[in-house]
Each structure stands twice: as structure tokens, then as C-alpha cells.
Image (cartoon, grey):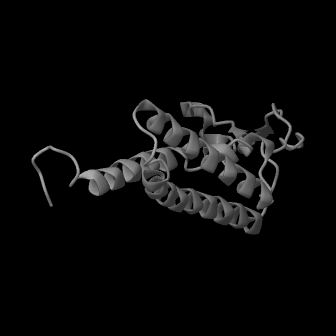
Amino acid sequence: MAKHKKKISEPTPKPDDSKKEPIESKTEETPETESNNSPPIPPTEPASNTAENSEKDRKLNKLFWLRVSLAIIAGTAATFIFEDIEGEERRWASIGFMIIIFAGTIVIAKGMKMQLPSSDRKKIVTQGIGSYVFLYLFTWIVTYTLVHTGSASSGINL
């Protein structure tokens, strides 16, 4: 806290005070209310340098793009792998295939030896999960539609 010095002002002059010497300003120090020697507050997060953060971010970025590319490849492959299965079973087989491929990316991520703090451990699972699911389903639906458009009796032939 800042130290302020009190300034004592001169009293109001009276007509007969003109012969006296002026009173000098006296300064008083106020007592210190807070000590400046308080112990430093420890940081809430462990100190890490930028090299570790950039390495972690680079690996998480690599995991994200791995999942995006596998979603597109697996969605396309699901169209042809499950072509012999009919009806509701095809849908559940494709969703099971999607989950198995995603579990494979978790194993790959653990093999990357990412140095994540305990609060970020779930990032191995959650990194890119939304993009993975939606790209897989989108690719699977689009490729299935393109492959089976000519055989459907919808009246649209390519």
C-alpha cells in the first residue's frame, strides 16, 4: 500500500500574526496497514514453458486431423463393407464400426505419449469427437446415396 505523508497546513493568519515567523510544514508518516512482505501466491496451474505447450498443441492438432481423415475414410468404407447387410442391421453395424474406429484413435492417441495435465486427460477422448461423428455420418450417407442412386426407383437417374 502506498505511504502518504500528511501535510500540516499553516493556521489562518490573524492581523497581529504578521510579525511571527511562518510555521514550517511538518510531515507525519502514517502507519503501514499492509505488509509488503506477504508470501507469493502459488500459481494454480503448474508452470510450463511454451515449448511444452506447443508440443502438446501440435499433438492434439495431429489427433484432430487424424480423426477427421479416418471419419471420411471409414464413412466411405462403411458403404461398401456393409452392403450385403439389409435393413436395420446395416445401420447398427455401421455405427458399431464407427465406434470401433474411434476407439482405435484413442489407442493411437495414448501411443503419442502426450504430456497432458490431469485436468486435460479427457482431451484424448473429446478432441475432435463431434467432427468425427458428423463427418463419418455425412460421408456414409453421401457415398451410400451416390452408389445406390441408380438402383432406387425414385425416378432420378444419373
Residue 1 visible in the displayed image: no
Badge count? 0
Residue found at the far bottom of this picture: 51
Residue at image location 75% in from the left, 40% down from the top: 119
Question: Is 12 in front, or is 140?
Answer: 140
60 or 77: nearer the eye?
77
Residue lying at 54% horizontally and 32% vertically, measured from the top left: 15
Residue 1 in percent (x, y) is at 75, 40
Indicate left or right for 44 with 138 as reference.
right
Q: Residue at x 58, y 62 (%)?
A: 66
Camera-side residue of 19 and 114: 114
55 is higher (above) or lower (below) than 109: below
Can you give x and y, in whole percent of width and height, for residue 117 in the image?
79, 47
Is 135 drawn above or below residue 23 in the view shown? Answer: below
- 99 lies left or right of 122: left
> Going 57% across and 45% down the picture, which residue do you hit?
97
Q: Is residue 65 visible?
A: yes
* Position in image of residue 42 (x %, y %): 84, 43
Q: Quadrant of the C terminus?
A: bottom left
Vertical relation: 105 (above or below) 24: below
| Depth check, front residue: 74 or 17 | 74
Percent x, y of residue 39: 90, 41
- Which residue occupies the extreme front position in the image? 84
